[in-house]
């Protein structure tokens, strides 16, 4: 008799045994007898993971279930306690914050003016520099320079960069080439 339950069914015994044998073989090849034992146990438990997760998920997501009730009550009590504590702290700190705001207002205005003047004068120089660097080839060169510096510093990142950075560089260059082609047509 088949059930009409949409949740994942229990796995069949032959499928569990096949998965256990395969996992045990992988464990044997990678770790010897202990690997065989660990693989066999993992292979026996692995097919039951979907069944257990769907059952747990349905239990946790019931609208009037115990986990949700406990979560709502805990959250409500945390909000009550933290809001009253935050109000008390805010009442105690607000005179100090007002005084600090009034005391630091003139220096903050001078710093803002200095930053605005510096940004206006150096903006075109920095913009031109980043326009040249922020190309795929420029970013690749910066990445290569960072790898060289890390290698000189004694960090072993060169092999990671070769296996991770080279495919990323190729992907960036392919995307850039594709964008240039689409812009031409």
Image (cartoon, rainbow, N blue to C red):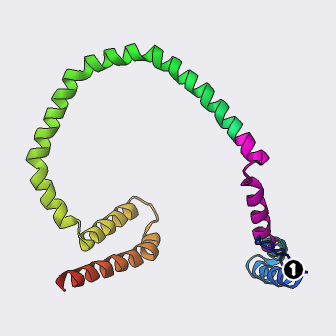
Residue 100: x and y, percent? 32, 18
Q: Residue at x 10, y 54 (%)?
A: 124
Residue 54: x and y, percent? 75, 65
Residue linked to disc 1 = 2
Q: Is residue 166 positioned above or below 134 on the image?
A: below
Residue 96: x and y, percent? 38, 15
Residue located farthest toward the right when viewing the structure as drawn:
1
Q: Quadrant of residue 139?
A: bottom left
- Would residue 55 appear left or right of 143 to someone viewing this image? right
How many numbered badges does the structure rendering display? 1
Q: Residue at x 42, y 71 (%)?
A: 161
Q: Secondary structure at mark 1?
A: loop
Q: Residue at x 86, y 81 (%)?
A: 12
What main secondary structure does the magenta stretch of the protein show? helix
Q: Is residue 142 magenta?
A: no
Residue situated in front as seen by the camera: 120 or 35: 120
Q: Is residue 60 magenta?
A: yes
The span shown in magenta is: 47-71
Q: Quadrant of residue 73?
A: top right
Q: Is residue 133 positioned above or below 105 on the image?
A: below
- Would residue 135 appear left or right of 43 to someone viewing this image? left
Q: Residue at x 23, y 22 (%)?
A: 105
Residue 152: x and y, percent? 37, 62
Q: Is residue 31 positioned above or below 80 on the image?
A: below
Q: Quadrant of residue 125?
A: bottom left
> Where the N terminus falls, by quadrant?
bottom right
Q: Count neighbours of disc 1 (C-alpha within 10 A) and say few if under 14, some if 14 to 19, many if 20 or more.
A: few
> Where the C terminus falls, by quadrant?
bottom left
Residue situated in front as seen by the camera: 107 or 144: 107
């Amino acid at each position: 008799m088949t059930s009409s339950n949409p949740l994942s069914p229990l796995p069949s015994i032959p499928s569990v045994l096949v998965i256990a044998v395969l996992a045990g073989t992988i464990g044997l090849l990678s770790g010897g007898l202990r690997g065989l034992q660990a693989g066999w146990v993992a292979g026996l438990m692995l097919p039951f993971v979907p069944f257990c997760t769907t059952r747990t998920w349905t239990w946790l997501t019931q609208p009037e279930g115990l986990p949700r009730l406990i979560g709502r009550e805990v959250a409500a009590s945390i909000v009550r306690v933290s809001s009253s504590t935050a109000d008390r702290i805010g009442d105690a700190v607000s005179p100090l914050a007002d005084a600090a705001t009034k005391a630091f207002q003139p220096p903050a205005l001078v710093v803002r003016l200095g930053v605005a003047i510096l940004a206006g004068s150096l903006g075109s120089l920095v913009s031109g520099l980043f326009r040249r660097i922020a190309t795929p080839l420029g970013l690749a060169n910066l990445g290569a320079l960072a790898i060289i510096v890390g290698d000189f510093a004694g960090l072993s990142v060169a092999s990671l960069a070769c296996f991770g950075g080279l495919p990323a560089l190729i992907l960036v260059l392919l995307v850039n080439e594709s964008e240039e082609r689409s812009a031409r047509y």
